[in-house]
Amino acid sequence: MKAIIKREFASYFAHPVGYLFIGVTFLLASFSFFIDVFLYATTDIAPVFSTLFSLVYLIVPLITMRLLSEEKRHKTEQVFYTSPVTMTEVIFGKFFGAGLIYIAATAIVFVHQLVLAFYGSPDWGLLFCRYIGLILLGGLLIAIGLVVSALTESQAVAAIVALAISMVMGQVDSLTQSSSSQTLIKITEWISPGHHFTGFFNGNFSVADVFYYLSMTGLLLFVAVRILDRKRWA
Amino acid sequence: MIEVNGLTKRYGEKFAIKDVGFKIGEGEIVGLLGPNGAGKSTTMNIMTGYLSATSGTVTVNGFDIREKPIEAKMNIGYLPELPPLYPDMTVKAYLDFIFDLKQVKANREEHISKICKLVKIEAVYPRLIKNLSKGFRQRVGIAQALIGTPPILILDEPTVGLDPKQIVDIRDLIANLGRRHTILVSSHILHEIQAVCNRIIIINQGEIVADGKRDDIIRKATEDARFTVRVIGPRDEVAKTLVRIGGVDKIVDDGVRESGSNDFIVIPKAKTDVRREVFERLAERKWPIVSMVGSQLTLEDVFLRLTETDETE
């Protein structure tokens, strides 16, 4: 699995996509930091997290679109099927490879916090709580992208479908807010990654929210493994 | 070393391969020969774990590819028809990746350098794969199959798309690898297989139609073991002597082709080889045999005959 993580992480820097992902994240997060935090002379970088929360939905498909679709297109997936590795190792290798680039990009918030530390006493606990939420959210979005990428040879299709699914999931609770059915509201809130992120954003570390992210991500990764295994039987 | 039993792969109603079975022993270089679409790649893909069979088993060094896939794959180096190369990687990075993926325990530098030397890719070692010629890509593909020194190599059409010089180079390389590995190599080109393999399996429309050494395949494919014998001796008596031999079905007088001798076409009964007896009977009568020539088919004839029959059905 280590070999796959290493290869995956390195591959982002062989294409513009890795630089683009990190560059856009740094740029927009830093812009938000300067405009909404630095100029307001506050030590709470909540606006940066708000920006990142919206941004990751849009740009995570960039790093997941090629994860498996490119392997299918170039037939390099044969390496995995015919080497002494399991499909679970392949999927986890891909997942963590993409996860590393996600962490590298979003870790910019620590730089922002360090800057604030020169001027005041920012709340590091709150920062870590929010960052854990952001990582869990990223993991879920990467898992969605990974499943979609396992289903198609086209990177463009993989990106668009992953984006569409992520957006629907992200907006699902707001779509039913005006509904009279409390059950429907409860269900959509449970499905919505954004709803579960709110706790982390407010500094409330909840085991239920962690469970939601880990179970959803785990389920999607399991689906991705099954898709790869199924291919042998096609 | 490799045991394939009743391998079948079905796509809906269509059979890609049907009841394919063979055994390959240690040190053999076996050629899997067949026209395009015969089922060569399907067979190899199942043997290496890339595809699952609808039914049948593949055992590699005692490990069933379905029951113990990791152990079985440890024993195989596979070069698919299209080498699985990442164009954005350098040869070095790619071979390092394969080394890690196969979890090879040997010294990395030493092991990879030895393979690069063997397949002659030292010159392109630091280059990006996307910038390599087809011949070098094929060599890198073979290098990745060799990583971990698997005892079995499965090479699917290793010379396809190469120029004549590159074909000769790859053929020599396979012959060289055959000294240390058991090899199954597929091709739709007869000469490729003939040049490097000591055993040939012919597959057509998903079924094995011949399996054996070159001459055995030719002999089996020949409808009867008829041959022409040229004898110095009285024509009628020689004919009578020949026709009395137990396994002989028919004798045809083929006239005089060389002065002082007579030619006879000896047609034995089905699956009977009477050459020894013909020699002994004629020798007893002190009638010298000047020549004995079989109505020999070439392997090419046999291949065409075996693979054309079904096409016309």
Image: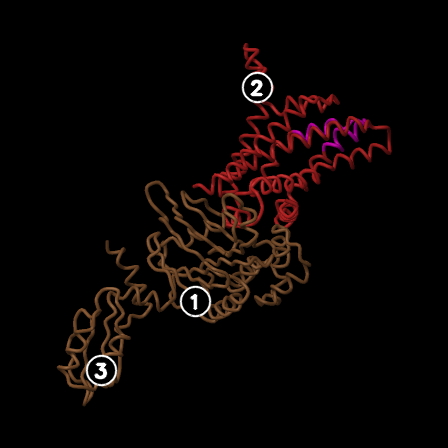
Chain colours: A red, B brown
Q: For the residues labelled 2 and 1, say whether their Cβ atoms are less than 8 Å apart.
A: no
Q: Earlier in the sequence, mark 1 or mark 3?
A: 1
What separation in Å lies between label 2 and label 3 (alpha carbons)?
Answer: 95 Å
Which residue corresponds to the image point at 48% horizontal and 39% vertical from the top-left?
Answer: A230
Residue identifier under label 2: A188
Q: Quadrant of the C terminus of chain A?
A: top left
In percent of width and height, residue A231 lies at 47, 41
Q: Type of residue at label 2?
A: Thr
Residue identifier under label 3: B230
Residue B147: image tag: none
Q: Which residue is outermost to the front? A: B284
Say which quarter of the image contains residue A174. Answer: top right
Q: Which chain does tag 2 point to?
A: A
Which residue corresponds to the image point at 48% horizontal and 50% vertical from the top-left?
Answer: B59
Q: Which residue is outermost to the top? A: A180
In percent of width and height, residue B241 lies at 17, 78
Q: Which residues are magenta?
A: A32-53
